[in-house]
Amino acid sequence: MTEELNEEIEKLRQAWPLRYDFYSSVGQAISTWASMETHLVSIASHLLDTSEEKTGLMLYSIQNFHAWLNIIDELFSMEPKFEKHRDEWTKISANLRTWNDTRVRLAHNTVWSSTDPTPMLRPGIFDSRSKSRKHKPLENAEIAAFIGLMVDVVGKVGNLALAMRAIRHGIAWTSPDTPASREGDPPSGGAR
């Protein structure tokens, strides 16, 4: 018994560097998602014309992420001054709905349900739902791709929140994604 335990401990010790990188990726992915959520709070606060603190209290009290998106969708339909950003929001929201499945897997799957030395996230051994079983294990490369998607969407929702803040407060604003004008170019209509 002691010999078997020592062998198992040695396997874990040898696998640690690979697991360390894997756990770092999982943490970065979840943290990047959380960063995106803060921008959603900002967007909703502009739609509600209230503070981010009050909006955060409301949204973070709702445990279903799809409910967050549904609320923001409905708020966009009620606030005509943000209409020009609705299509942009609809695209972002559709992607977030899809990517939420990966976020749930990052938060609720485990590496401990397999003896495979390569760390991968799998459903817990008692999660017998068909939705959970249909996915192949989530590997580090897929987590890295998810982080890339999240970094991109954080920029998009952050810019959307800034554009909405400008509209809400009557401030001219040009997205950082808009190419800078050169001397002699016609004015773009936004402030620099």
Image: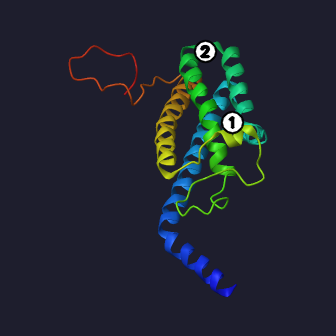
- Residue type, numbered disc 1: Ser
Q: In the image, what residue type sits under mark 2?
A: Lys
* 166 relative position to 5: left or right: left
Classify mark 1: helix, strand or loop: loop
> Which quadrant of the rendered structure holds the N terminus?
bottom right
10 Å neighbourhood of mark 1: few (<14), some, or many (≥20)? few
Q: Quadrant of the C terminus?
A: top left
Left or right: where does residue 97 sit relative to residue 118? right
Q: Residue furthest left?
A: 184
Q: Quick check: 99 left or right of 190?
A: right
Residue pointed to by mark 1:
51
Q: Nearer the viewer, residue 173 or 22?
A: 22
Identity of the residue drawn at 69% across and 50% down: 123
Residue 9: horizontal and vertical position, in percent? 60, 78
Q: Nearer the viewer, residue 191 or 148?
A: 148
Find residue 69 and report its horizontal and vertical position in percent: 68, 29
Residue 135 sits above or below residue 75 on the image: below
